[in-house]
Image (cartoon, helix red, strand yellow):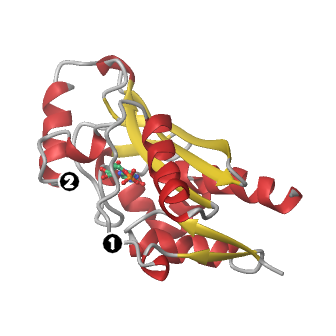
Amino acid sequence: MKKKLVFATNNAHKLEELKAILGDKVDILSLKDIDCYADIPETADTLEGNARQKSLYIYEHYGLDCFADDTGLEVDCLDGAPGVYSARYAGDGHDSKANMEKLLYEMKEKTNRKARFRTVISLIEKGEEHQFEGIVNGQIIKEKKGEAGFGYDPIFQPDGYAETFAELGNDIKNKISHRARAVAALCEYLSKT
Ligand code: IMP
C-alpha cells in the first residue's frame, strides 16, 4: 500500500508540484483533504523551527505523518537577512515588489552581493522528525530583470547563469532551485524507507 503523507501548506502550486514529483510513491494529502482550515503558526526565528512547527502541528492535532517546508533568502552582507522573514521583509502585506525594493535599498552601497535561497523540509514519520535542506547560491543584482516566477526571482541570479530566476523561467528553475534540491533529498529518503 502507498504511504500517505500530509503536506502542510496552503500553497496550491507547491502541492501540485509535490504531487507530480512524489505521486507514484506517496499519496500526498492536502490540508483540505484532512479538513484542516487552521492558521498554522509560523512563529519560530529559524527556517528549521518554522518547518518543524508546521509539521508538528499536524502530527499533534491529527496524528498523521506529514511534512512542511520553509524558505528564506539569506544575503551575506546583511548577516543572513531577510532569511526567515523573507515573506514579510517590508511589512505584513507579503508584497513582493515592496520586499525587493527594500532589499535593493538596503544593499545600495554594498559590493558583496552574495546570497542564497535555502529551503528546509521537516518530515514527521511515526513520531520522528527528519529534516532536509536545499540551497541555491547566487547574487542579488542591482535592478529587477524578468517576469516569470514570484517573490525575489527578478533580482536573484543563480551561480552559473547570466539570467535571473525570473528570466530563466520555471523549467530551469525547477531543476536547480533550493526547493527542488530539498524535495530531491526528501524523495531520496522516502525511496529508501
Ligand atoms: P515560503 O516559505 O516558501 O512561503 O517562502 C517564504 C518567502 O521566501 C516567500 O514569500 C518569498 O518571498 C521567498 N521565496 C521563497 N521561495 C522563493 C523562490 O523560489 N523565488 C523567490 N522568492 C522565494
Instruction: Check the image and report above or below for 1 versus 130.
Output: below
Q: From the viewer's perspective, is 126 left or right of 77?
A: right
Look at mark 1 in the image and give the residue it sits on.
37
Mark 1 or mark 2: which is in front?
1
Q: From the viewer's perspective, is 112 left or right of 17?
A: left
Q: Crowding at label 1, few (<14), some or many (≥20) Cα neighbours within 10 Å? A: few
Name the residue located 64 percent from the left edge and 52 percent from the top edge: 124
Circle 1/circle 2 CB separation < 8 Å: no
**Which of the 4 image quadrants contains residue 151?**
bottom left
Q: From the viewer's perspective, is 178 left or right of 90?
A: right
Name the residue located 42 percent from the left edge and 31 percent from the top edge: 46
Locate residue 64, reporting x and y percent: 61, 64
SS of the residue under disc 1:
loop
* Numbered-mark total: 2
Q: Crowding at label 2, few (<14), some or many (≥20) Cα neighbours within 10 Å? A: some
SS of the residue under disc 2:
helix
- Closest to the observer: 50 or 64? 64
| Amino acid tagged 1 | Tyr
Locate residue 28, reporting x and y percent: 61, 75
Q: N-terminal of the two: label 1 or label 2? A: 1
Look at mark 2 in the image and give the residue it sits on.
96
